[in-house]
Image (spheres, coloured by chain):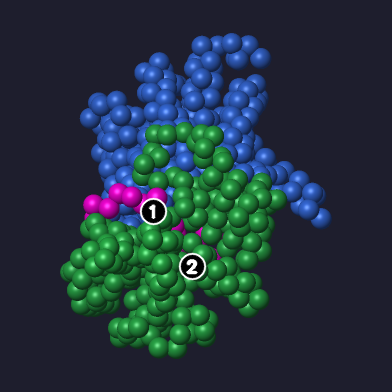
Amino acid sequence: MTSLTRVIGEACHQHIIELNQVSFAYQDQQVISGLNLVVKERDFVGIIGSNGAGKTTLLKMIVGLLRPTHGEIMLFGQPVRSFRDWERIGYVPQKNAFNPLFPATVQEVVLSGLYSNKKIFKRVHQEDRRKLAEAMEVMHISDLASKRIGQLSGGQQQRVFLARALINQPDLLILDEPTVGIDAQTQADFFDLIFHMHAHHQMTFLMVSHDIEMIEGKLGKEPRDTYGSIKFYARHSHEQDCVIPGLQHSIL
Amino acid sequence: MEIITADFFQRALAGGLLIGLTAPLIGIFLVLRRLSMIGDTLAHVTIAGVALGFLTGVYPIGMGIIFAVLASFAIEKLRKAYKGYAELSIAVIMAGGVALASLFFTLGMGYNNDVVGYLFGSIYTLDMTDLYVVGAVTVLVAVTVFIFFKELFLLSFEEDAAAVSGLPVKLLNMIITVMTALVISTAIKIVGALLVSALLTIPAACSLIIARSFKQSVVFSVIIAEIAVVAGLVIAGVWNLAPGATIVLLLIAMLILTLVGKRGFTT
């Protein structure tokens, strides 16, 4: 029995993201120094911090866009530098990350979620089209498929980016201030959707946000950890779900 | 009208058709990545290379290509050094190109007429060597864009997302830059260094307004460029006008028509 529990514990608490003593300096300015962070499987981690606190730097280091000056970052147990399984990560950018005049349709944007390092030199085939249709269906944007992305409302655009992030059925979803510039009701709907997904799917979430009320409301008032002015809030999805599929009944 | 059947005119038409494909194909990515001005800069640097080519007796377009590629690497380096003020790199390299070009001009007084041809274009002097070079560049650019089409799309749409998908962002950026240098250095004999960026950017500017998708915008910009090149060459040939200038003015006319037409649709 003890060995079984240990196996379950390991399966459930795999470290999805791990930062060991990570530092980052931009030119002479130290932005982050000696930061440790562990995001476990099925965690929902919310990061709050004032402007210039290093949230964006942190996120960029985690996805390999910036290299830490010191320390080590692991994704799914592999160092970021040699990490290759990028299709396991879905990414939802800030709303203003693209130009609204950009002539891309909703389906072109959603489909681009499949264009990973492993897809280079490969054409888009039938299976990809099926995934595209499914992702758009789930986010209720199928009827917008051939609209230009700039013609949509902020909330619709966010669902497009969420569909793009989900098209690979990722294990980790990273959201960078996903609701900046969107009206309050649409924001609330968006967060409900995200937390619903966390409760019902085997996914880990990392979200940077400026919306303290929403984060505290969803993840609890006590931050799990603080670093300078950055606060980490976290919630783990229900412990009873935390079992290897198929073994659940034999345990209960 | 007999000019149209002349050998030099046929070569001009062939060269024009090839550049009419490559220039907008690269141009659309430059425009979408807000690098419209890079065309002008590389063109000025290419002129310095061309001038040095005349001075040293080396194939001018070949020397122009080398200069343009080196300058494109220098721009990338400077862009990183002045992050957030990226246009500074473009200004610096442009000034350097013009300075070098005028230095080489004054050193080789006798060649000035030939060099002027590269400033304003001299498509009628296109020889078979030029055509082979333009042809090789066209094949290279068309194949590269075809192979990396979806990656270049994601890179242009959202560079961060491309990086998070594990795409080799630096390599793709480098590919775009080098291809830009190749296209510009081969295009300047056709429309001229002072006008080459028009052929890169105006077709994209038109298609941004009318295209309903990214694929369409690429196709439209190529079609628009080809129409302008063919019509421009024929009009210039028949009425004895400057070919490069005619092509560019036609492009601008098409842009105005697109803008007016679009307004007509929406209101």
Residue indicated by mark 2: A198
Q: Is residue B17 above or below residue B37?
A: above
Three-letter amino acid code of the residue under disc 2: His
| Residue displayed at 59% across by 35% down | B219
Q: Chain of mark 2?
A: A
Residue at 45% across / 21% down in the picture? B125
Viewer can see residue B119? no
Colour chosen for chain B: blue
Question: Camera-side residue: B122 or A124?
Answer: A124
The colour of chain A is green
User: Residue B262: x percent and y percent?
Assistant: 74, 48
Which residue bears the numbered disc 1? A88
Q: Secondary structure at mark 1?
A: helix
What is the quadrant of the N terminus of chain B in the image? top right
Circle count: 2
Where residue B9 sits, quadrant-wise, is top right
In the rendered structure, which segment of residues is drawn in magenta?
A81-99
Please give the name of the residue rendered at 30% of the width and 29% of the height, measured from the top-left corner.
B62
- The answer to if A95 sits in the magenta stretch is yes
